[in-house]
Image (spheres, rainbow, N blue to C red):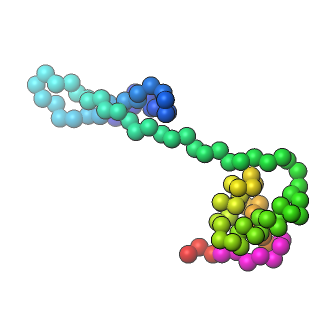
């Protein structure tokens, strides 16, 4: 399978050649459009440095209110692992996989 290109929104049309049965005087491949990829959402960034106690409390409250660790991490511009470390330090029980 030969891929001729791919497309981002607003970019040129992407196509790929796919094989199909060969008949008399038919080309060996057909060109079909590729699906358009949506760009990934960027994570919010925050100023570097330690979190304040108010930010740590807000992170713990957001998690306890039902937000996933990944949602909370994206909201506050930190990693999911950092969220779990803050929760552990604050004594907040984490939810398991369900």
Q: For this rendering, which residue is in front, 4 or 83?
A: 83
Residue under the point 70% across and 61% down: 72
What main secondary structure does the magenta stretch of the protein show? loop
Which x, y percent locates residue 21? 17, 35
Location of residue 5 with respect to 71 vertically, above or below: above
For the N terminus, the image quarter is top left
Q: Is residue 18 left or right of residue 26?
A: right
Location of residue 98 with respect to 45 vertically, above or below: below
Residue found farthest to the left: 24
**Residue 91 lies in magenta, yes or no?**
yes
Which x, y percent locates residue 90? 83, 73
Residue under the point 84% across and 71% down: 89
Residue under the point 65% across and 71% down: 66
Q: For this rendering, which residue is in front, 36 or 30?
A: 36
Which x, y percent locates residue 39? 55, 40
Range of the magenta residues? 89-95
Which x, y percent locates residue 41? 61, 45
């Amino acid at each position: 399978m030969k891929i001729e290109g791919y497309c981002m929104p607003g970019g040129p049309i992407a196509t790929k050649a796919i094989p199909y049965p060969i008949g008399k005087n038919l080309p060996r491949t057909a060109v079909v459009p590729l699906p358009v990829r949506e760009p990934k959402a960027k994570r919010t960034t925050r100023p570097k440095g330690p979190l304040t106690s108010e930010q740590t409390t807000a992170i713990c409250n957001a998690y306890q209110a039902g937000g996933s660790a990944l949602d909370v991490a994206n909201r506050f511009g930190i990693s999911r692992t950092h969220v779990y470390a803050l929760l552990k330090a604050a004594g907040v029980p984490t939810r398991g996989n369900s």
